[in-house]
């Protein structure tokens, strides 16, 4: 009996579980995470990180009763039946999946549809102080370093829902965006800080060393105490 009636959410959960099982079985995936500064098992479990080795997802889901057409429509396999997330580290989101290539393919991939709200919002929505970062690897190293009041935009521009979430109560927001050579990250942080300020939210942008994002800051030897100093020096 096919399980099309179960809808997309259970399908994403099956995919997430399958990719999580694959992670520890593939040294290239573990090595990539180590290179990005992710080494604590707790962060792997907390974010439910997985790996898509490729060429095996369709067979697994077919055994569970999912029709190939349903997998194609969901964006999980391509027209040839191969994993669209092949050779990617996979992160489950609120209503989507995000894959980060560890090879030469385009770095970022989502399933069709929006990126949703702020990452892990339910876990931080009551926090009086929030650190907001661009990417999931930024989130990961901060959480791993003990900064559990962190969330992620999945980019440097907030959508309408994310902006509303940040404005849903009195809080202080620290925008720890990338310090890009072209200035795009810091420009986006300044713009978001102004918009939040106009809504009565205390917002500060964190100045990371040139060329760094939070992920590279920690992966290249930065520590929690140093990052606290960056937060203390943040500008409105």
Image (tube, grey):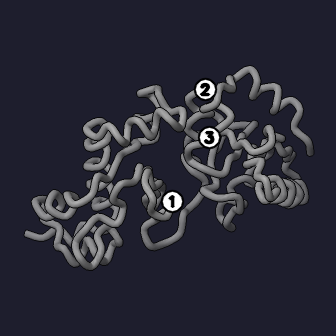
Identify the residue under disc 1.
107
Q: Are marks 2 and 3 in contact (CB under 8 Å)?
A: no
Q: Residue furthest left?
A: 1
Residue 235 position by quadrant = top right
Residue 194 in the image: state x and y as whole percent: 89, 57
Disc 2 from disc 3: Cα separation: 16 Å
In the image, 90 versus 201, the foreground residue is 90
Residue 229 in the image: state x and y as whole percent: 82, 26
Disc 1 from disc 2: Cα separation: 25 Å
Identify the residue under disc 2.
145
Drawn side of residue 232 relative to residue 142, left or right: right
Disc 1 from disc 3: Cα separation: 28 Å
Q: Earlier in the sequence, mark 2 or mark 3?
A: 3
Confirm whether residue 182 shows in the render.
yes
Q: Nearer the viewer, mark 2 or mark 3?
A: 2
Residue 75 position by quadrant = bottom left
Q: Nearer the viewer, mark 1 or mark 3?
A: 1
Identify the residue under disc 3.
124
Please rate how many residues cluster around mark 2, counting C-alpha atoms within 10 Å: few if below 14, some from 14 to 19, many from 20. some
Indicate the secondary structure of the residue bearing disc 1: loop
Indicate the secondary structure of the residue bearing disc 3: helix
Above or below, 224 relative to 166 = above
Indicate the secondary structure of the residue bearing disc 2: loop
Quarter of the image for the N terminus: give it.
bottom left
């Amino acid at each position: 009996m096919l399980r099309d009636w179960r809808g997309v959410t259970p399908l994403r959960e099956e995919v997430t579980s399958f990719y999580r099982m694959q992670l520890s079985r593939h040294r290239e995936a573990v090595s990539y995470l180590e290179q990005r500064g992710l080494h604590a098992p707790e962060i792997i479990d907390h974010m439910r990180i997985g790996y898509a080795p490729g060429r095996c997802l369709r067979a697994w889901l077919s055994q569970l009763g999912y029709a190939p057409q349903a997998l194609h429509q969901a964006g999980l396999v391509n027209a040839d039946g191969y994993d669209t997330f092949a050779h990617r580290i996979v992160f489950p989101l609120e209503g989507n999946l995000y894959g980060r290539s560890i090879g030469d393919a385009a770095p970022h991939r989502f399933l069709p549809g929006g990126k949703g709200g702020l990452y892990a919002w339910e876990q931080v929505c009551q926090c009086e102080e929030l650190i907001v970062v661009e990417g999931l690897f930024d989130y990961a190293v901060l959480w791993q370093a003990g900064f559990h009041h962190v969330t992620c935009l999945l980019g440097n521009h907030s959508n309408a829902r994310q902006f509303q979430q940040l404005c849903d109560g009195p809080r202080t927001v620290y925008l720890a965006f990338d310090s890009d050579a072209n200035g795009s990250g810091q420009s986006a942080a300044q713009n978001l800080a102004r918009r939040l300020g106009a809504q009565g939210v205390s917002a500060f942008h964190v100045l990371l060393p040139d060329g760094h994002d939070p992920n590279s800051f920690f992966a290249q030897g930065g520590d929690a105490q140093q990052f606290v100093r960056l937060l203390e020096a943040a500008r409105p």
